[in-house]
Image (tube, rainbow, N blue to C red):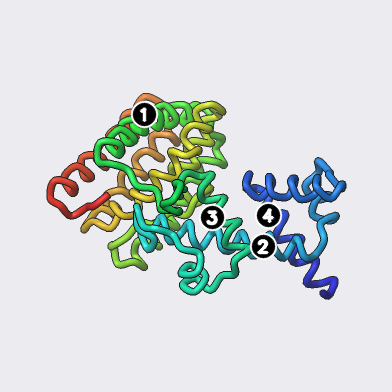
């Protein structure tokens, strides 16, 4: 492999190290080879090229499968078969298996003896409980974000919503898909709260499971623009440093989503 291609791989992997899953894999591999280094760049520089390539392929497989789950292309409760997935997503067994392990650790896949691996699913009651938890926790996160986010973070939050508006327009108002991390409005507020424990709870298993349903519900007629408007009002309250209003608006936003879910379940237009 040329030095240029190797350098590109290293650069990409440094970016991927922002993911705890990737860091865990790197530390495991380097420790097993006796070259453990606590510094991220040192880890990458010491990784054999074959391992760098394998990690990159595994990460690509992970991103493709996670997106398929969030968007419903792999439906809740659907059984996962390695042969079918390799063919369907043009993957090889090694990266696929590593991706499946990461998805399982995020709670998006469940493995049961003699039943194989399935996409996680929840009952209507469990989903309602998740949204009630979100309502309280994200309300608090919005209040603290109004008190603690920097002016630059607030500007970035509003810029993110501008990009969301463009995406909704490109989807002709029929979908509101937010990639995870900084591109996600709710993720930015959780981290902006500067409340480590609260962020850990909001951005752990709860976050990944809720994303599965947020996207499906955003496809309701008129919902994407309405949700974006609600997001903008929350961001305005945060920019005004009005924590009480930000908390109120966030709670109302999530409560509206919960009511929307209940209506769809009762109508039979949403299956879990």
Determine which residue is flagged by label 2: 56
Please tell me which of labels 4 and 3 falls first in the chain. 4
x and y percentages locating residue 168 in the rendered image: 35, 61
Q: Nearer the viewer, mark 1 or mark 2?
A: 2
Label 4 and label 3: CA atoms lie apart by 21 Å
Q: Which quadrant of the figure has residue 172? A: bottom left
Label 4 and label 2: CA atoms lie apart by 11 Å
Is there a contact, CB below 8 Å, between mark 4 and mark 2?
no
Label 3 and label 1: CA atoms lie apart by 36 Å
Q: Nearer the viewer, mark 3 or mark 1?
A: 3
Determine which residue is flagged by label 3: 100
Asked whether residue 148 is in view, the answer is yes
Please tell me which of labels 1 and 2 falls first in the chain. 2
Q: Nearer the viewer, mark 1 or mark 4?
A: 4
Above or below for 74 versus 230: below
Please tell me which of labels 3 and 2 falls first in the chain. 2
Quadrant into which the N terminus falls: bottom right
Instruction: Name which residue lies at 41% across and 55% down.
Output: 70
Instruction: Name which residue lies at 43% across and 34% down.
Output: 238
Query: What secondary structure is marked by label 1?
Result: helix
Camera-side residue of 256 and 237: 256
Q: Nearer the viewer, mark 3 or mark 2?
A: 3
Is there a contact, CB below 8 Å, between mark 1 and mark 2?
no
Determine which residue is flagged by label 1: 247
Is there a contact, CB below 8 Å, between mark 3 and mark 2?
no
Label drawn at residue 15? 4
Query: What secondary structure is marked by label 2?
Result: helix
Label 3 and label 2: CA atoms lie apart by 15 Å
């Amino acid at each position: 492999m040329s030095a240029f291609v190797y350098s590109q791989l290293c650069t990409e992997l440094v970016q991927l190290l922002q993911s705890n899953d990737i860091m865990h894999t790197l530390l495991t591999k380097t420790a097993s080879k006796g070259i453990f280094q606590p510094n991220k760049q040192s880890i990458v520089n010491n990784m054999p090229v074959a391992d760098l390539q394998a990690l990159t392929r595994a990460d690509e497989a992970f991103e493709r499968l996670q997106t398929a789950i969030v968007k419903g292309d792999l439906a809740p409760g659907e059984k996962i078969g390695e042969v079918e997935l390799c063919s369907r997503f043009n993957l090889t067994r090694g990266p696929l298996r590593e991706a499946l392990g990461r998805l399982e650790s995020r709670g998006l896949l469940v493995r049961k003896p003699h039943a194989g691996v399935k996409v996680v699913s929840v009952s209507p009651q469990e989903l309602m409980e998740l949204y009630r938890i979100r309502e309280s926790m994200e309300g608090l996160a919005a209040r603290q974000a109004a008190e603690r986010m920097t002016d630059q973070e607030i500007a970035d939050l509003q810029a993110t919503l501008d990009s969301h508006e463009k995406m909704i327009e490109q989807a002709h108002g029929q979908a509101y898909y937010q990639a995870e991390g900084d591109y996600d409005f709710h993720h930015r507020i959780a981290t902006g709260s500067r409340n480590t424990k609260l962020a850990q709870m909001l951005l752990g298993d709860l976050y990944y499971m809720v994303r599965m349903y947020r996207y499906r519900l955003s496809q309701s007629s008129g919902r994407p623009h309405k949700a974006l408007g609600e997001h903008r009002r929350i961001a305005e309250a945060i920019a005004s440093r009005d924590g009480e209003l930000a908390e109120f608006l966030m709670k109302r936003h999530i409560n509206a989503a919960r009511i929307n879910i209940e209506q769809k379940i009762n109508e039979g237009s949403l299956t879990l």
